[in-house]
Image: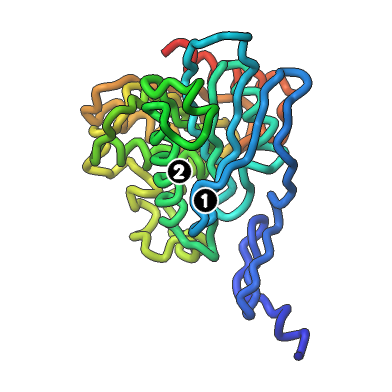
Amino acid sequence: MDSTNTNEVAHDFPPFIRVYKDGRVERLLGTETIPPTTDPITGVQSKDITISQDSGVSARIYLPKITTNSTQKLPLLIYIHGGAFCIESPFSPHYHNHLNLIVYQANVVAVSIHYRRAPEHPLPIAYDDTWEAMQWAFSHKNSGGPEAWLNEHADFDRVFLAGDSAGATIAHNMVRRVGVDGLEGVKIVGIILVHPYFGNNEPSKFLDFIFPTSTGPDDHRIYPAGDSELSRLGCTKVLVFVAEKDGLNDRGKSYHEVLKKSGWDGTVEIVETEGEDHVFHLFNPNCDKADDLVKRMASFIKDN
């Protein structure tokens, strides 16, 4: 076989992916993984589970340190990772460490979802996978599901969704679907959108490639501002984080404004971090501003 043919590039989207003419996909970032642990500092435990053998959808589940004989149920956090819909996973060091902190500070049970990624699985497959994973988690609402941590410790009247970047976009779409289609026996209180990927006003070759059925940069599945169903968002509280130097800043702010005016019967807050760029808190988790962001996420959950 001519090795030069196998190395010929068909699509190149740095810093995320490179696709070769033979169909091979090279992920340029976000490939490192670490195993689940019992964190020695926070006492947070984690383990990996498979949700669907057919699709390969899976998750890493987190449990905070439980007081002996405690029967108190804890809020449930559904977390959706970012990475331009095509890189990263719940098993990456960035996300594992981030979830440890959130679970510890907010005192929640968390399900961090691993959806199938583009381009092998183009959008909206990631949305469908996340919905499937949520339904799996919610099947534990009467304590009859397959996962003991959810049966014993999760309060399905206090459910939150959170995500960063592309994960924030998915989180919004999940709560929209809850509002439009309904959800029995589970109450989603709020969503936390960290530096949401709502695109920009320009056509995107990358978006066209990973989301071929999209109608463009204003498709409501990417940018919800023009969505006729926005007022039916299926939660009562929304917290949006934006970063001053993030190229996605403008659309994050406009989402906040449009949601306020949509007729939706809820409250939306926005927090802007000055002097920082996109998902800075994942790459520099020990800085004061990252600490502030995690504390604000935790207080949003604990105060509701």
Which residue is painted at 21% across and 28% down in the image?
263
Residue 133 has which mark?
2
- The residue singled out by tag 1 in the image is 57
Quarter occupied by residue 261: top left
Residue 70 is situated, as x and y percent measured from the top left of the image, at 55, 9
Which corner quadrant holds the C terminus?
top left
Residue 84 is situated, as x and y percent measured from the top left of the image, at 55, 50
Q: Amino acid at mark 1?
A: Val
Residue 197 is situated, as x and y percent measured from the top left of the image, at 49, 44
Residue 260 is situated, as x and y percent measured from the top left of the image, at 30, 26
- Tell me if I can see residue 155 in this picture: yes
Discs 1, 2 touching: Cβ within 8 Å:
yes
- Tell me if I can see residue 195 in this picture: no
Which residue is painted at 40% across and 51% down in the image?
128
- 149 vs 292, nearest the viewer: 149
Label 2 crowd bin: few (<14), some (14–19), many (20+), radius 10 Å: many
Quarter occupied by residue 213: bottom left
Question: Does residue 116 appear to the left or right of 260 in the view shown?
Answer: right
- 33 vs 151, nearest the viewer: 151
Q: Amino acid at mark 2?
A: Ala
